[in-house]
Image (cartoon, rainbow, N blue to C red):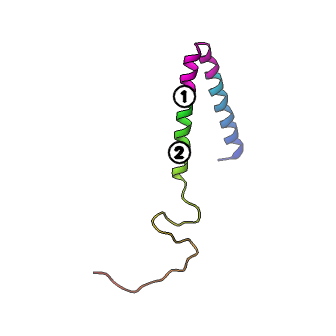
Amino acid sequence: MDRRLTALFATALVGVVVVVGLALSALGSLALVVYLLLLTAGLSLLVRRQRALQPPTGRTCTCCTSTVRDPVTVVDRVVP
């Protein structure tokens, strides 16, 4: 996705969050606190999921410790 489009979307999303927060502040501080807690919980879940989806750097998989540049040994053996 284009960086400008991503920045535009992020700016619009922040604007919506701020406007909803301002609207809820008119209902009272309890509604605003609940909204902020829900917003914080949602953002923390998104951050955790994003970090879990990113593969470790320099590794080909998570089941071994070899890297992409390690030599490969080919064995001519058939296992019954």
Is the stretch drawn in magenta largely helix, strand or loop? Answer: helix
Residue 39 in percent (x, y) is at 56, 30
| Outermost bottom residue | 76
Secondary structure type for disc 2: helix
Residue drawn at the location 36% of the way across and 85% of the way down: 77
| Membership of 29 in magenta stretch | yes
Residue 8 in percent (x, y) is at 69, 37
Residue 65 in percent (x, y) is at 50, 69
Secondary structure type for disc 1: helix
Query: What amino acid is labelled 1 in the image?
Result: Leu
In the figure, 31 relative to 76: above or below? above
Mark 1 vs mark 2: which is more N-terminal? Answer: 1
Seen in the image, is 55 located left or right of residue 16? left
Residue drawn at the location 56% of the way across and 71% of the way down: 68
- Which image quadrant is residue 18 in? top right
Seen in the image, is 47 located left or right of residue 75? right
CA gap between label 1 and label 2 equals 17 Å
User: Quarter holding the C terminus?
Assistant: bottom left
| Outermost right residue | 4
Residue drawn at the location 65% of the way across and 22% of the way down: 19
Residue drawn at the location 42% of the way across and 85% of the way down: 75
Numbered tag placed on residue 48 in the rendering: 2
Seen in the image, is 70 located left or right of residue 63? right
Residue 59 in percent (x, y) is at 54, 66
Query: What amino acid is labelled 2 in the image?
Result: Arg
In the figure, 75 relative to 26: above or below? below
Residue occupied by mark 1: 37
Which contiguous range is marked in magenta?
A: 21-37
Numbered tag placed on residue 16 in the rendering: none
